[in-house]
Amino acid sequence: MVTMPSEAARRYALVRDLVAAGMAVMRINCAHDDEAHWAQMVKHLRRAERETGRSCRVLVDLGGPKLRTGRIEGGARVARWKPARDVRGHVVSPGRIFVKAQARSETPPDRFDLTLRLESDFSASALPGDLIRVADCRGRFRELLVRGTGDGYCWCESEQSAFVEDGAAIELLRGEQIVAQSRLTESLTSNSR
């Protein structure tokens, strides 16, 4: 068996010499060249068979899937949280979300479903009972109830499922008043409860 180089499509003498030397299988690697070249290789083989009186089979090696490694650019990063529900759909445990500024290094003091990092720190303005409203990927607004605060972070609960994307607008609300605004820079799924 001989794998054909690209020049086998241009040079009949190459194919004829290989058949005369005993080539029993012509292998065409479809990862190289194109249909016109492959057809010309087979045409040269059939002519060489007639001239030499020898037969030769053709093996066409189809190109398979190619693995690509590395980051795929342009894809959106989407994170999700959801409350635990019973068989009737009632919330039995809200989603728990830890919110901090991107520049802060605090880690959640307890287990949370998700950590949201924001462009700017509005945790100093947050009070228990405030709401954080975030734009969901599906065109909905989702609300998180602020349950506690600390130096550089706040933690929240939500009884609504959400899909949030990096860059989503986030607002801190006290009643109907917007107290602070930011954007989501990164969301990290935690080892949930």
Image (cartoon, helix red, strand yellow):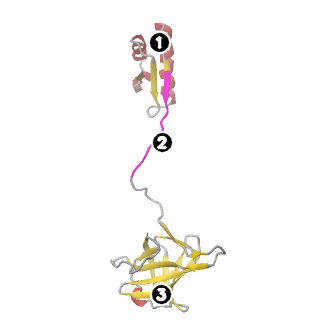
Q: Amino acid at mark 3?
A: Arg
Q: Which mark is residue 59?
A: none
Residue 28 horizontal/vertical position (percent): 46, 26
Which mark identifies residue 147? 3
Q: Residue at x 44, y 43 (%)?
A: 66
In the image, is residue 90 above or below residue 58? below
Q: Which residue is mark 2?
A: 65
Residue at 51 percent of width and 82 percent of height: 157
Whether residue 67 appears in magenta in the rendering, the answer is yes
User: Residue 112 lies in what quarter of the image?
Assistant: bottom left
Is residue 125 within the magenta segment?
A: no
Q: Position of residue 174 (x, y in %)?
A: 51, 91
Closer to the N terminus: mark 1 or mark 3? 1
**Looking at the image, which residue sits at the far right?**
88
Residue under the point 44% across and 88% down: 148
Coordinates of residue 3 in the picture (x, y in percent)? 41, 25
Q: Earlier in the sequence, mark 2 or mark 3?
A: 2
Q: Is residue 132 above or below residue 138?
A: below
Amino acid carrying label 2: it is Pro
In 3D space, how far apart are the residues under numbered discs 2 and 3 (Cα atoms)? 50 Å
Within the image, what quadrant is residue 176 found in? bottom right
90 lies left or right of 8:
right
Magenta segment, which residues?
58-69
Residue 20 or residue 161, whichever sits in front? 161
Q: Which residue is mark 1?
A: 48
